[in-house]
Image: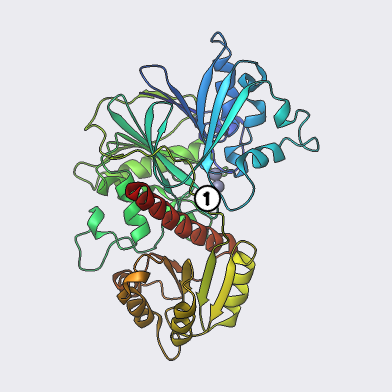
């Protein structure tokens, strides 16, 4: 499989003399299989260059676009993608199913006359839209696995398997927990990872031949950029090494990092990687760089592929927030009130009463509360077989290893530490619900 980096920069295009080596265009990565199937990962400004290249082939051309999410740096190249302006060309655009506007509406939004002279529906190329959740899919004959990332927006990571190799694209993601390893466990293996989210993240890249991973910040910068939704090379390397990844390409370079700084970061990443015995080869992706991913251990994911594209729920979903702090009730109202039926409870006993009357689709739970603490409540909820699959997001000020581990052991599905942002809370709730609905849909398919 051939991989080409058309754009490697995160956040905003950063052209200029200082970025010629690593590139100034925002994210766009092209994968082409030996049979000529083309996948385009993200539509940052680098997509314009790919479009110019594609014009050299005789029309019609076709490709599948996999969008991680629709933040600017991932879609701004789209209106400048020349093949869209040629009749007969065909594109399928896949993106995570969000809680807001449809994908077509979001893309059309940045092409309204206020911003751009050509409307989306005036483009002569044919576009098909496909909503994705967290699942295994067949995309243009290729096996594609998806997984939600930790970003203040619904954001999907992709794992593509073709030509006997696996390539994972995991950008716009940050660690779920500051503490990576469980106390008392041998660090460096997937099983030793403390937070379920980080463990799932490492597992998703298990044995991959190439992982293209977010690494916007240096470890020092990350200290003040927590909750912004991006990673460091240290985190990406720890995950990739635990997962037995062969090569790690760092991407989503910070606009503040010029070539000189990028070389320094790359050197630090290489130094850091020396501590692993069979760690991945690591490099910072350069705009314009191509690499051939050779046959490795072979695909290990995608046991089953479902063609279903959507688990969209017709009814309005309900969320119960259990916290003795009324400020959290107010924040939850702002983050979740528009999209869900929200109920609140100030303690564990009140929560049990509410749940007995009507089971919510998800619970957001504080740990330290009067009368009955969050952990006791969680254990009581899990003791009821009917509530075994209920997603519970623990929202707490205690981000230490002991509390995190205890919450997961008691049955939490996710763990978010205060202070958090409104988009973070709404995304984590949306992710938990989407994952739950996807499991329910899978069970129904098997039963049918
Ligand atoms: Zn981004
Ligand atoms: Zn983003």
Label 1: state its secondary structure: loop
Q: Please tell me whether residue 274 is drawn above or below residue 361 in the rendered image.
A: above
In screen coordinates, is 72 left or right of 117? left
> x, y (%) of residue 376?
35, 82
Q: Quadrant of residue 50?
A: top right
The answer to whether one can see residue 419 in this image is: no
> x, y (%) of residue 398?
41, 75
Q: Quadrant of residue 91?
A: top right
Near-viewer residue (323 or 194): 323
Find the residue positioned furthest to the front.
Answer: 448
> x, y (%) of residue 171?
46, 43
Q: Quadrant of the N terminus?
A: top left
Q: Residues within 10 Å of mark 1 (few under 14, many from 20)?
A: some
Within the displayed image, which quadrant is ligand 1 positioned in? top right
Q: Please tell me whether residue 444 is drawn above or below residue 385 in the rendered image.
A: above
Q: Which residue is mark 1?
A: 312
Q: How many marks do you count on the picture?
A: 1
Near-viewer residue (307 or 20): 307
Q: Please tell me whether residue 441 is drawn above or below residue 184 in the rendered image.
A: above
Pointer 1 residue Cβ closer than 8 Å to ligand 2: no
Find the residue positioned furthest to the right.
Answer: 114
> x, y (%) of residue 351?
47, 81
Q: Residue at x 78, y 29 (%)?
A: 117
Find the residue positioned furthest to the bottom.
Answer: 371
The answer to whether one can see residue 40 in this image is: yes
Q: Residue at x 50, y 41 (%)?
A: 252
In screen coordinates, is 117 left or right of 392? right
Q: Residue at x 50, y 62 (%)?
A: 429
């Amino acid at each position: 499989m051939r991989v080409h980096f058309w754009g490697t920069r995160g956040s905003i295009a950063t052209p200029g003399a200082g970025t010629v080596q690593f590139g100034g265009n925002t994210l766009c990565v092209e994968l082409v299989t030996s049979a000529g199937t083309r996948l385009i990962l993200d539509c940052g400004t680098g997509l314009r260059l790919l479009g110019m290249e594609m014009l050299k082939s005789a029309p019609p051309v076709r490709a599948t676009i996999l969008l991680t999410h629709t933040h600017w740096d991932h879609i701004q190249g789209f209106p400048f993608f020349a093949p869209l302006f040629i009749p007969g060309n065909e594109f399928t655009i896949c993106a995570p199913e969000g809680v807001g506007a449809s994908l077509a509406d979001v893309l059309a939004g940045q092409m309204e006359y206020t911003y751009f002279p050509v409307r989306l529906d005036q483009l002569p190329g044919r576009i098909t839209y496909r909503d994705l959740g967290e699942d295994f899919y067949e995309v243009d004959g290729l096996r594609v696995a998806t997984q939600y990332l930790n970003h203040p927006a619904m954001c999907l990571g992709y794992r593509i398997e073709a030509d006997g190799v696996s390539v994972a694209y995991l950008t716009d993601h940050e660690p779920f927990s500051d503490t990576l390893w469980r106390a008392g466990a041998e660090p460096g293996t997937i099983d030793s990872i403390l937070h379920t989210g980080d463990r799932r993240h490492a597992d998703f890249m298990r044995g991959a031949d190439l992982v293209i991973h977010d690494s916007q910040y240096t470890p020092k910068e990350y200290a003040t950029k927590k909750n912004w939704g991006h990673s460091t090379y240290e985190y990406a390397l720890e995950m990739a090494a635990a997962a037995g990844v062969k090569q790690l390409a760092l991407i989503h370079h910070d606009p503040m990092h010029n070539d000189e700084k990028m070389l320094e970061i790359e050197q630090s990443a290489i130094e850091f990687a020396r501590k692993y015995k069979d760690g991945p080869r690591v490099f910072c992706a350069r705009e314009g760089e191509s690499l051939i991913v050779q046959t490795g251990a072979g695909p290990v994911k995608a046991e089953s592929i479902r063609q279903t594209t959507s688990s969209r729920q017709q009814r309005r979903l309900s969320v119960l927030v259990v916290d003795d702090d009324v400020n959290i009730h107010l924040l939850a109202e702002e983050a979740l009130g528009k999209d869900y039926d929200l109920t609140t409870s100030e303690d564990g006993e009140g929560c049990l009463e509410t749940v007995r009357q009507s089971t919510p689709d998800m619970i957001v739970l504080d740990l330290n509360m009067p009368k009955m603490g969050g952990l006791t409540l969680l254990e009581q909820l899990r003791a009821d077989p009917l509530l075994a699959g209920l997603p519970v997001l623990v929202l707490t000020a205690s981000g230490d290893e002991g509390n995190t581990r205890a919450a997961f052991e008691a049955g939490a599905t996710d763990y978010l530490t205060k202070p958090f942002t409104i988009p973070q809370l709404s995304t984590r709730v949306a992710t938990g619900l989407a994952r739950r609905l996807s499991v329910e849909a899978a069970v129904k398919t098997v039963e049918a």
